[in-house]
Image (cartoon, grey):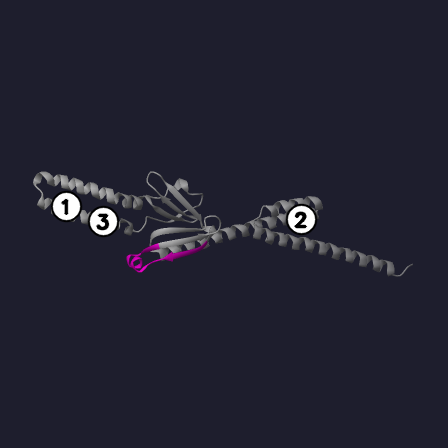
Amino acid sequence: MAYPRRLLTDGEEVLQQFRPHWKVLLPALAWAMLLAALTGVALAALSASWRWWSLAVAAAIWLALSTRSVVNWWSTTYILTTERIVVRRGLLARTGTELPLESITNVLFNQRVVERMLGYGDVLVESAGSQGQSRLEDIPDPEAFQSEIYRARELRSLHFRGTGAGAARDVVAQLEALASLRERGHLTEEEFTVQKRRLLAALPGRARGDADARAHDDEHADHAHDDEHADDVAAHLDDGEGGPTA
């Protein structure tokens, strides 16, 4: 069953969706084989009137012993999206875990010899914050899943960096427009400072620092230009006072 689109955020896409490895079904398969052998012996030994009863008893025993593993396999889903890892468990009573990609600090996988032969293992996801470590069990091809998580996390971080850089460029453009209005006398120095602080406050940390530094450089250049202009005027006045008199 595909992950419902209504549970995805705007622009979020599902990269992988799968159930646990079929190894989870091995207990059910083993019980089925054992009960089939016992039922065959019973059918050969019992009279015709008891054969149907033996089949019914064998089926009831298999359901009692195997239902748990089959339901656990069917009702457990792992989903990797462009923004998070989602784990859903349960058929009637449901539980869910979500791990944002940007909070993931490390991904480890573990495979014993038999697990490597059968192609499954556990993946340990370490996250910043209160969640700490999350173990995802019975993952098919855990090494490939680990690589896919790292790739999705890198794309997510590039998205955030790109968003921050775009915001910084936009704010710098607005600051340059404010500086132009100030130079033409449409904004006072106090109004320029208030608007500048408002724009910088809306930026994430690194982008804010970049835009602030750019704005500071522009402001410093403006003051240097004003000082240079004042020096030229003073020099011109000095030349006029030191020239010949009539």
Q: Is residue 67 above or below residue 232?
A: above
Q: Which residue is mark 2?
A: 180
Within 10 angstroms of label 2, few (less than 14), some, or many (20 or more) residues? few
At a point 9% along the width and 45% down the height, the residue shown is: 45
Q: Residue at x 38, y 47 (%)?
A: 79
Q: Is residue 186 visible?
A: no
Give the labeled residue for mark 1. 39
Q: Earlier in the sequence, mark 2 or mark 1?
A: 1
Give the amino acid at mark 2.
Ser
Is residue 107 part of the magenta span, yes or no? yes
**Residue 105: where, in percent of width, then height?**
46, 54
Residue type of the residue flagged with mark 1: Thr
Foreground mark, 1 or 3, reads 1
Magenta residues, start to end: 105-121
What's the mark number on residue 116? none
Q: Is residue 243 magenta?
A: no
Q: Helix, strand or loop at disc 2?
A: helix
Which of the two residues, 170 or 4, is positioned nearer the viewer here? 4
Please tell me how crowded label 3 is: few (under 14), some (14-19), or many (20+) other residues with Cα within 10 Å: some
Rate crowding at label 1 as few (under 14), some (14 to 19) or many (20 or more) other CA atoms within 10 Å.
some
Dot 3: what SS?
helix
Comparing marks 2 and 1, which lies closer to the viewer?
1
Residue 173 visible in rendering: yes
Q: Earlier in the sequence, mark 1 or mark 3?
A: 3
Residue 88 vs residue 235, the one in the foreground: 88
Q: Position of residue 127 (x, y in %)?
A: 46, 51
Give the residue type at disc 3: Leu
Apparent side of residue 154 relative to residue 66 in the rendered image (left or right): right
Relative to 65, is 54 on the left or the right?
Answer: left
Give the number of the disc on residue 29: 3
